[in-house]
Amino acid sequence: MAKPGLLLDSGALIALANRRETANQSVNRVLGDFFGELVTTWPAVTEACHMIPDHLAPVLLAWLGGPRWRVQDDILEIRLSEKPIVREVSQDWNVNVSYAQDGSVVELVILDAVKAGFMPFGSGERKAA
């Protein structure tokens, strides 16, 4: 029997990350009682990270088990696979790609991620969704 799934949109992610959001307690209550698989999309994560205060974005990304952003160094690490890394290639001075034996991409490491525009948050500016 398949596990039930629950799709989290950006609104749920924003409420989850920010205790000051009106829906924070409701989202936490629903997720606390849910024993299935949580699913979201990168556009929803991007929008949520853009809308929440900058200091909460790394917390949300860590909770999702997704990219790791080292704020102080502005380094973004995106792990796509658990395969062993056999080769690393620099695409530019700030983008390194790691490959598995079969040629698939295992990891991307991006230096100066906010400055280079890879991260949609960190500037302190807020835009309407």
Image (cartoon, helix red, strand yellow):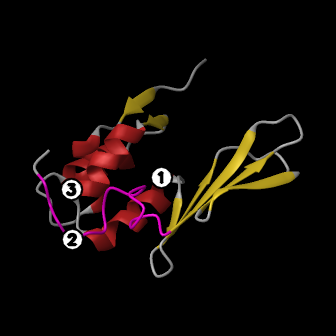
Residue at coordinates 29% horizontally, 37% vertically from top-left? 9
| Quadrant for the N terminus in the image | top right
Residue 64 at what x, y percent from top left? 47, 52
Q: Are marks 2 and 3 in contact (CB under 8 Å)?
A: no
The residue indicated by pointer 1 is: 64
Numbered circle sitting on residue 51 = 3
Question: Quadrant location of residue 116?
Answer: bottom left
Residue 106 at what x, y percent from top left? 73, 46
Residue 53 at what x, y percent from top left? 23, 68
Numbered circle sitting on residue 124 = 2
Main SS of residues in magenta? loop
Front one among 41 and 76: 76
Q: Nearer the viewer, mark 2 or mark 1?
A: 2
Front one among 15 and 54: 54
Q: Secondary structure at mark 3?
A: helix
Residue at coordinates 53% horizontally, 56% vertically from top-left? 67
User: Can residue 16 be seen here?
Assistant: no
Name which of mark 2 and mark 1 comes first in the sequence.
Answer: 1
Name which of mark 2 and mark 3 comes first in the sequence.
Answer: 3
Residue type highlighted by circle 3: Met
Q: Nearer the viewer, mark 3 or mark 1?
A: 3
Q: Secondary structure at mark 2?
A: loop
State which region is magenta. 112-127
Front one among 26 and 105: 105
